[in-house]
Amino acid sequence: MSNLFAGPHLWILLIVILLLFGAAKLPALAKSMGQSARIFRGEMKAMKTDDATVASAAADAPVAEPTASAPADPTAGAGGVDTPKP
């Protein structure tokens, strides 16, 4: 199987795009796609810096030791079944 974007395939694809969108709309479409790509890259950079600050904050935070908690209902028997009171 040959490359789809080589030779006449590329020209046919460009002609179909030109027919679908029209020559007047192509510059606006390209501008919109460029702005979207720029926004996406900016958000990706922001996510990386947020991850880096969270990771450094997590490394600096002291580790808390888990403690055992008391049962919610001390009158409840084993298995959560109430035992009759005398």
Image (cartoon, grey):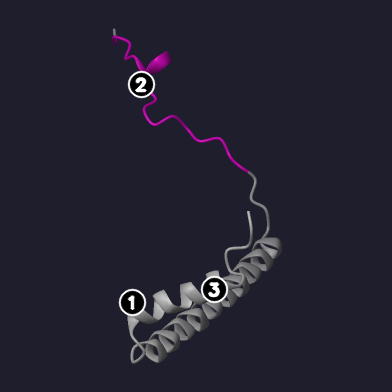
Instruction: Please tell me the numbered disc located at residue 10.
Output: 3
Amino acid at dot 2: Thr
Q: What residue appears at the point 47 percent right and 78 percent down from the top-left corner?
A: 14
* Element type where label 3 sits in the image: helix
Q: Is residue 42 above or below residue 27?
A: above
Q: Report the magenta residues as a range.
A: 66-85
Q: How many marks?
A: 3
| CA separation in Å, label 1 and label 2 | 75 Å
Residue 55 x/y as whole percent = 66, 64
Q: Is residue 3 left or right of residue 20?
A: right
Instruction: Please tell me the numbered disc located at residue 61.
Output: none
Amino acid at dot 3: Leu
* Element type where label 1 sits in the image: helix
Camera-side mark, 2 or 3: 3
Would you identify the image quadrant in which residue 19 lies?
Answer: bottom left
Q: What residue appears at the point 39 percent right and 81 percent down from the top-left corner?
A: 18
Q: Quadrant of the C terminus?
A: top left
Badge 1 is on which residue? Answer: 20
* Element type where label 2 sits in the image: loop
Q: Is residue 61 left or right of residue 14?
A: right
| CA separation in Å, label 1 and label 3 | 15 Å
Count neighbours of disc 2 (C-alpha within 10 A) and say few if under 14, some if 14 to 19, many if 20 or more: few
| CA separation in Å, label 2 and label 3 | 78 Å
Q: Is residue 2 above or below residue 9?
A: above
Q: Are marks 1 and 3 in contact (CB under 8 Å)?
A: no
Mark closer to the chain start, 1 or 2: 1
Q: Nearer the viewer, residue 59 or 2?
A: 2
Amino acid at dot 1: Leu
Badge 2 is on which residue? Answer: 75
